[in-house]
């Protein structure tokens, strides 16, 4: 049985540069993340899910409780929560809960109590460092021989600093820890697949996948693909059904332990239901094929077909396919051409200024090289990793949340495939010996990730500033027409009275709630410039316009 997490390659650790020593590398990466985090505002986030988590943490700390209860000021007048400010908050027991996953919230609560939002970022940062180390382990196994150490550390630094993982390390979201667990599980199973580890290690892989599944729904897809493919390869390699069954049964046993434990904790803190969320995602994947194809395109190439850049994406796809064929001849020119087109797509997305880059192949240029690595990186471990990265993608696209393709960075639902391909790309550029390719792809990756840091900086400060303005507004209540808006506000949720009214009927109901509460004024925040001159008994007095992170909002002020 080999050592875990990586095979030994005969390199004397004492002769390694200090930055190639695991403890120094981890602390250096953490230092980089901490420094970058102070460029961001602690009151603005990468997405509305983060803001909802922060609002919940703020309420838990303020109430000195471990119950994730958001509360609701208009509960007596709206007992069903139709107008609850945090869209999709549900009544659970005697509270109001909006929790997509529990482990991150529970782990973040003591950190938030001690050091606020900035200290909670240690959790995604730790996840990002874990993903980098897991990628190092895989790269050393795939490269092997004299190139193993160089490939391993190249994968570590590229995944940690110049891939989408670096962006998710700077936001209180589960993506980085989830990807770390999934890539770690693949690293364990890669040893089982190539015969250097016992099939019993599948229990460890299953546990990591189970932990990931408590945070990320797509972990179920990667668990199915990674374990299933490992079982098939072990069966073919050993011709022993028993060894293959050990992989499957061990993985299931390992998976069940954290999954069941999480379920018990969910029930203890308020009747949350991760299983219900999973079944909802599964049933939602049945229909709307055309829309799912468009959103899959977006999360792969960063642009919708309707944007007019589909031809660039099609050419990129063709070049990747050609590169896979010609890699066996050692020809890197097609790979370089593919990278040029990936850069062109990035420019197309950012032509009007920094913005989300949802496409995996655009946010992670090394993933393009990884896609082209079939045949160029030999060995069963490399082919196993390649197979997982590709086979999981169609299933993820089939069941991913609809409507969230554009406002994300690097295809977050398929982040694990992205990290695996980035690791393969790192092995490719090291083993090919092509210095031009190596310098070009690493430089491009650094520029792309830097644009993500700039975007997160601008977005977090813009959101922070606008919510600060809304909190100081003179109106008694702010009624928001966008269901996800108040979820962006984090701790600002508790700083004033909000209502969320998505439909016109909801807006009429919100006016009645404001009136019945004895208030004299309210504001309606909308993305439409026009507003009725009268709502119920209220008269429109003024309208103001603001632009937040590239989106126009109109605030219509009413007096009763």
Image (spheres, grey):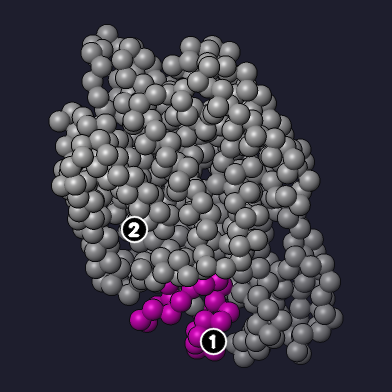
Q: Are marks 1 and 2 in contact (CB under 8 Å)?
A: no
The image quarter in which residue 58 lies: bottom left
Residue at x 27% of width, y 39% of height: 236
Toward the top, the furthest residue is 15
Q: Pinpoint residue 382: horizontal percent, then vertical percent.
A: 38, 30
Q: Quadrant of the C terminus?
A: bottom right
Residues 185 and 311: in front is 311
Image position of 415 (left or right of 480): left
Question: What SS does tag 2 mark?
Answer: loop
Residue at x 51% of width, y 51% of height: 394
Q: Pinpoint residue 360: horizontal percent, then vertical percent.
A: 56, 41
Q: Pinpoint residue 239: horizontal percent, then vertical percent.
A: 21, 40
Residues 71 and 191: in front is 191
Image position of 369 (left or right of 515): left
Label at residue 78: 1
Query: 298 above or below 159?
Result: below
Q: CA distance from mark 1 to mark 2?
A: 32 Å
Q: According to the image, label 2 marks what residue? A: 214
Principal secondary structure, stretch drawn in magenta: loop
The residues colored magenta run 73-98
């Amino acid at each position: 049985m080999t050592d875990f997490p990586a095979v030994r390659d005969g390199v004397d650790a004492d002769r390694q540069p200090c930055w190639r020593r695991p403890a120094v590398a981890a602390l250096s990466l953490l230092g980089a993340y901490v420094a970058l985090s102070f460029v961001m505002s602690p009151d603005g986030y990468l997405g509305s899910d983060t803001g909802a988590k922060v609002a919940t943490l703020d309420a838990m700390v303020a109430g000195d409780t471990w119950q994730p209860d958001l509360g609701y000021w208009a509960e007596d007048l709206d007992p069903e929560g139709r107008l609850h400010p945090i869209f999709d908050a549900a009544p659970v027991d005697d509270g109001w809960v909006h929790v997509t996953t529990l482990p991150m919230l529970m782990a973040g609560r003591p950190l938030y109590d001690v050091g606020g939002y900035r200290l909670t970022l240690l959790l995604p940062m730790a996840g990002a460092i874990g993903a980098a180390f897991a990628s190092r382990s895989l790269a050393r196994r795939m490269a092997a021989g004299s190139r193993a150490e160089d490939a391993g550390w190249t994968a570590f630094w590229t995944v940690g600093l110049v891939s989408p993982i670096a962006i998710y390390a700077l936001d209180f979201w589960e993506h980085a820890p989830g990807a770390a667990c999934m890539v770690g599980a693949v690293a364990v199973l890669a040893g089982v697949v190539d015969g250097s580890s016992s099939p019993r290690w599948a229990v460890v892989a299953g546990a990591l996948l189970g932990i990931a599944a408590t945070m990320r729904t797509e972990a179920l897809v990667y668990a199915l693909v990674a374990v299933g493919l490992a079982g098939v390869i072990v069966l073919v390699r050993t011709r022993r059904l028993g060894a293959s069954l050990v992989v499957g049964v061990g993985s299931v046993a390992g998976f069940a332990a954290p999954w069941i434990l999480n379920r018990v904790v969910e029930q203890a803190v308020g009747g949350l239901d991760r299983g219900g969320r999973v079944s909802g995602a599964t049933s939602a994947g049945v229909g709307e094929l055309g829309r799912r194809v468009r959103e899959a395109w977006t999360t792969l190439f960063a642009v919708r077909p309707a944007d007019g850049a589909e031809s660039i994406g099609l050419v990129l796809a063709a070049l990747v396919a050609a590169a896979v064929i010609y890699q066996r001849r050692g020809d890197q020119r097609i790979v370089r051409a593919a990278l040029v087109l990936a850069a062109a797509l990035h420019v197309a997305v950012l032509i009007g200024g920094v913005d989300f880059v949802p496409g995996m192949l655009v946010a992670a240029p090394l993933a393009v090289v990884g896609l082209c690595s079939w045949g160029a990186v030999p060995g069963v471990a490399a082919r196993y990793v390649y197979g997982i990265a590709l086979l999981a993608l169609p299933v993820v696209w089939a069941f991913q949340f609809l409507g969230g393709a554009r406002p994300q960075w690097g295809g977050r639902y398929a982040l694990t495939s992205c990290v695996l391909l980035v690791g393969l790309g790192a092995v490719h550029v090291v083993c090919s010996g092509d210095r031009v390719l190596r310098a070009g792809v690493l430089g491009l990756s650094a520029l792309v990730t830097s644009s993500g840091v700039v975007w997160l900086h601008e977005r977090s400060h813009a959101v922070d500033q606008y919510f600060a303005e809304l909190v100081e507004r003179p109106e008694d209540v702010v009624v928001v027409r966008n269901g996800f808006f108040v979820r962006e506000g984090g701790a600002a949720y508790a700083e004033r009275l909000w209502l969320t009214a998505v439909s016109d009927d909801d807006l009429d109901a919100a006016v009645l709630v404001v009136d019945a509460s004895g208030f004299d004024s309210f504001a309606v925040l909308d993305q439409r410039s026009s507003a009725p001159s009268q709502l119920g008994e209220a008269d429109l007095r003024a309208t103001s316009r603001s632009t937040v992170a590239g989106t126009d909002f109109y605030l219509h002020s009413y007096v009763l």
